[in-house]
Amino acid sequence: MSADLNIDVQKEWKLFINGRWEPTASSYEIVDPNTTNVVGHAPEATAAQALDAVAAAKAALPAWKALSPGERGVYLARLADVLEEDSDAWVDTVQAETGATLKIAATMQVGGPTIDRFRYYSSIPDLNESLMPQPVGASPLGPAGLISAAVHRQPVGVVAAITPYNFPLTNVAGKIGPALAMGCTCIIKPAPQDPLGILLLAEAIEKAGFPPGVVNVVTGSGPEAPAAIVDSPDVNMISFTGSSMIGSKIYENSGKTMKRLLMELGGKGALIMADDADVGKAVGAIATVWGFHSGQICTAPTRVICHRSKYDETVEALKGVSGFLKVGDARADDTLVGPVITETHRDRVETFIQSGVDDGATLVCGGERPDLPGYFVAPTLLADCTPDMHVVQEEAFGPVVVIMPHDGDDEAIAMANNSIYGLYSYVFSEDQSRAYRIGQQLETGNVGLNLIQPHMEAPFGGYKMSGVGRDRGRWGLEAYSEIQAISWIS
């Protein structure tokens, strides 16, 4: 059975700037990927309104960063409390705009991880430190003595958080949680496809009593508003999650004003199966690409590099698993694979699959368009791939897996590193020390050994075209800070 939605499609959504709800002259449709029905109309911000949000964040910065970490933490803890009270009522809206299955919407899009991140950063460690005094002799620079120094972490300033469509609330919590804890003020620019949940978050921020201007939300479907934010000299840092192509443009434009950058970009996760890998464990992990938000996750193990002795068994096992992954109505309790975000993205994924077939890959399963009203792609497996294929080198961001054979650990490592991306890779071997040695040689910011589940306080980010910087845990706090050293002689 499909659940009925409790959504006010006619609700007038507004921008949240300087603690006020600002109307816009126009809006644009938010479409449910599951049904193609319109589920709301988001405000279309102008460049001028985006700059108003920047000005509000800049004006609010001195008072906010003057608060102690404990005082700022009170606001974050209160926000977590508000979310615990209110977020269950958001599930229908967030589910409809993201197209996530009910289970993913309830457990991963709304609630749990989002609340946890604000709660985590409501109490932060002291990142300041004192250096051991250093004896110095007399010189033209000064008299002899002991030089002491203190190293302080200062807020980087005004932060623009530009967030993706796949997990909008969880992602933005991972950005503004540490930024606010460090004493920064924020402008949130959510992805155009699903901004309504972020506007609900702004309602919670208002309810939690944050001072005006500390957090601002600007939405829009075009490039004008985000371009104005990125180009503004009053924005000190851009925290962006999205495609490597857009990330490169932000990187280039930010250089004009020497902005700090934190960017988590594309991935093409390699999963190495050694000759002693447990096929069942590995196949279960690989199947998450298909069952977890339809493969719309940058950490997905979409590039399987399997030892030749396990290759045929793994291909058959994946083919078998695909038959148990029900593709269908995202609001049905038994659906495991819902739609991708838009019609354009579905068409892109289909073209991606066809390019693999045209290049000589074997279509093991999937590839067809399910007979459903939304933007669905069937779980797809392409075998007999070679490292040079476009389908192997580029990210589909959908329920598509490619598999290639290897003949030994060194070859597998070389194949895994043959990528412009380096976000998250995986190693499956029953010898944990062997898996560890392989993992250390992979050019990725994160490696999972015989598992997919990440450690949520470990530093997260990528090598190469997968990004710049690290977040999560204390690394998230450091990312939104500047280092100041103060020295004196005694």
Image: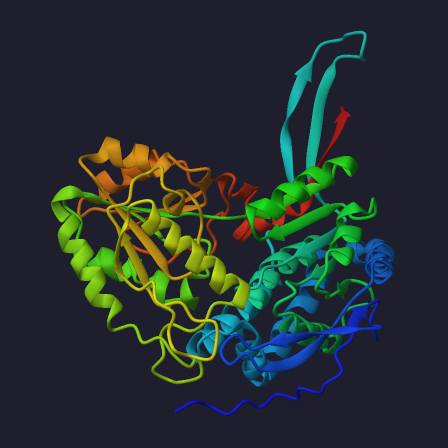
Q: Nearer the viewer, residue 207 or 427?
A: 427
Q: Position of residue 263 (x, y in %)?
A: 59, 46
Q: In the rendered image, which quarter contains the C terminus?
A: top right
Image mark count = 0
The image shows residue 1, relative to residue 51, as above or below, that is: below
Give the residue at x 60% y 65%: 118
Residue 98 appears anywhere in the view:
yes
Q: Is residue 124 left or right of residue 233?
A: left
Q: Position of residue 224 (x, y in %)?
A: 78, 56
Residue found at the far front of this picture: 358
Q: Nearer the viewer, residue 455 or 269?
A: 269
Q: Position of residue 267 (x, y in %)?
A: 46, 48
Q: Quadrant of residue 486?
A: top right
Q: Quadrant of residue 23?
A: bottom right
Q: Nearer the viewer, residue 468 or 396?
A: 396
Give the residue at x 57% y 64%: 165
Give the residue at x 66% y 80%: 40
Q: In the rendered image, which quarter contains the N terminus?
A: bottom left
Q: Position of residue 131 (x, y in %)?
A: 63, 31
The image shows residue 485, relative to residue 134, as above or below, that is: below
